[in-house]
Image: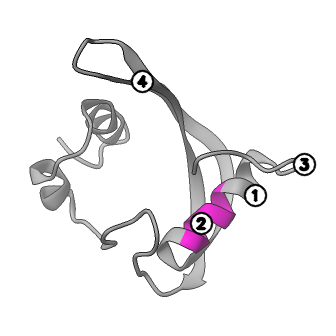
Amino acid sequence: MDRLRLRETLQQAAEREILEETGLRVKAKDPIYTFDLMDRNHENRIRFHYVIIDLMADLIGGELRSSDDAVDAKWFTPEEVEKSEVTERTREFLRKIRFIR
């Protein structure tokens, strides 16, 4: 998600973006993990500063597919996640909730 729309709650924005990018309908809940990520250029200057807020959500329906920003969309087992290219902060979170070792 790149930004909230005016008068849109964090949960509404997450639900909208997940539907647009994955085809899944969810009911977003409270934030469960927050961190920031700084993208730097070759001179080590900050190009972008992202604030990542993960929310718990219940899957309501839809069919998983990729769209726009998502090159691919699929479900992962814990073993597949451990072998994938996710950020270290994401790995920390997945360890914290005991999804991976």
- Indicate which disc, 3 or 4, sits on the residue closer to the N terminus: 3
How far is disc 3 from disc 1 in space, using C-alphas? Answer: 10 Å
**Within the image, what quadrant is residue 45 found in?**
top left
The answer to whether 69 appears left or right of 6 in the picture is left
Q: Which mark is residue 58?
A: 2
Q: Provide residue 69's location: percent of width, then percent of height.
A: 44, 62
Query: In the image, which is nearer the foreground, mark 2 or mark 1?
Result: 1
**Within the image, what quadrant is residue 42 found in?**
top left
Q: Which mark is residue 47?
A: 4
In the rendered image, the vertical position of residue 20 relative to residue 62, given as above or below? above
Q: Residue at x 14, y 60 (%)?
A: 80
Query: In the image, which is nearer the foreground, mark 3 or mark 4?
Result: 4
Q: What residue did someone put label 1 on?
A: 12
- Indicate which disc, 2 or 4, sits on the residue closer to the N terminus: 4
- Indicate which disc, 4 or 1, sits on the residue closer to the N terminus: 1
How far is disc 3 from disc 2 in space, using C-alphas? Answer: 23 Å
- Indicate which disc, 3 or 1, sits on the residue closer to the N terminus: 3
Mark 1 lies on a secondary structure that is helix
- Indicate which disc, 2 or 1, sits on the residue closer to the N terminus: 1
Query: What range of the chain is rendered magenta?
Result: 14-20
Answer whether labels 3 and 1 touch (C-beta < 8 Å): no
Task: Indicate whether residue 18 is drawn in magenta.
Answer: yes
Q: What residue did someone put label 3 on?
A: 7
Q: Provide residue 78's location: percent of width, then percent of height.
A: 20, 57
Query: In the image, which is nearer the foreground, mark 4 or mark 1?
Result: 4
Q: Residue at x 57, y 51 (%)?
A: 1
Classify mark 2: residues with Cα within 10 Å, few (<14), some (14-19) or many (20+): few
What's under tag 4, amino acid-wise? Arg
